[in-house]
Image (cartoon, grey):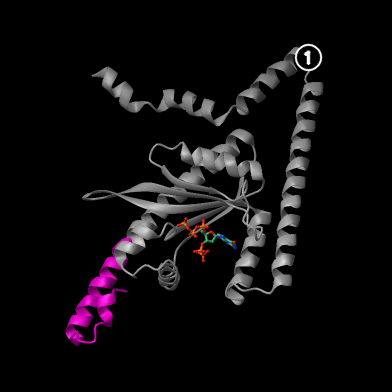
Amino acid sequence: MDTDLNDEKMLPEAIITKLQDTAKEWAQIQLIYESALKQVNTKIEILNNEFTMVHKYNPIEHVTSRIKSPESIVKKLKHNDKDVTMDNIVMCLNDVAGIRIVCSFTSDIYKIADMLAKQGDITVLKIKDYIANPKPNGYKSYHMIVSVPVYLSGGAVDAKVEIQIRTIAMDFWASLEHKIYYKYEGNAPGNISRELKECADLAAFLDAKMLAINEEINGVSEEQTEIVYTSEEAAEEQTEEKIKEEEPDDMASRLKKFFSINQRKRRSV
Ligand code: 0O2
């Protein structure tokens, strides 16, 4: 991966040593990014479980993660006129480690982004809101570049992770567009680009319609709850129901009382 390897005057042994060093360095970098992915994936899983418990619905349809392939890394660095070195991989690329979260509704995207950004050990480095500002081709998605500490025996290393959050419809469109983009190497015929843009508009319409239906259903079920609960007994049940539907923030502050082990330990000393 290093440009020195192109030096024709290099002896074969020196080339082998250089390759071994490069392979070792790449394995270490990969370990950091894989660990960062594990941490962020766990955070997402916990938030999803909590959200499901509190709101009785699952905001995340599915999550995928990947380490960018060496071929894509080299291609992107070259595209950005950068030498292919380990330093440039870590410093110039934001998406060596990437996570994609696919949600049911657009409103879920912002909720999840907010919940992640609030976490103490996540630093948001950059946000690209392609939902509020879609790309001219119709691409929509919410991108966050975050940094998370990876704890090694010798200390913490901060690693960047790109988190893409989008709806099922946005994901469907983006996956297909990505394949077409690569097929035509970025130069798709005009009619294909126009049709893809039309499809992006249809996907956006579908998202808006689905969100409206969901909000209508939720509105109706709330109204029904109000009509059903009239007697004292039912009102009590309603209060219980309210407790179950508390905001995640309330749940966290209530649970902190039970889980403040360190505080209790300090008090008892
Ligand atoms: P791949 O093969 O998916 O990894 P940055 O340094 O982050 O500011 P970058 O990486 O150009 O610069 O940022 P951007 O625009 O946020 O794009 C990052 C990724 O978003 C891309 O990675 C794609 O995965 C996705 N993406 C961005 N624009 C489009 C688009 O128009 N269509 C589709 N389908 N995906 C898009 P890569 O490395 O380009 O590709």
Q: Is residue 42 left or right of residue 88?
A: right
Which residue occupies the foreground of this view, 128 or 152? 128
142 or 16: which is nearer to us?
A: 142
Tag 1 secondary structure: loop
Whether 80 is drawn above or below 4: the answer is above
User: Magenta-highlighted stretch: main secondary structure?
Assistant: helix
Please name the residue that numbered disc 1 is placed on.
231
Residue farthest to the top, as pictured: 232
Look at the image and give the residue range highlighted in magenta: 1-29
Residue at 27% in and 66% down = 25
Left or right side of 256 for 222: right
Rendered-image quadrant of the N terminus: bottom left
Instruction: Look at the picture and state if 24 lies above or below 113.
Output: below
In magenta segment, residue 265: no
In the rendered image, is residue 30 in sight?
A: no
Q: Residue at x 19, y 86 (%)?
A: 9
Classify residue 209 as left or right of residue 240.
right
Number of other residues with Cα within 10 Å of mark 1, as a class: few under 14, some 14 to 19, many 20 or more: few
Residue ID at (39%, 48%):
147
Is residue 68 placed above or below 56 in the rendered structure? below
Residue 190 spot, x, y in % from top left:
70, 71
Name the residue type under label 1. Answer: Ser
Quarter location, residue 214: top right
Residue 29 in view here:
yes
Q: Position of residue 178 (x, y in %)?
A: 60, 67
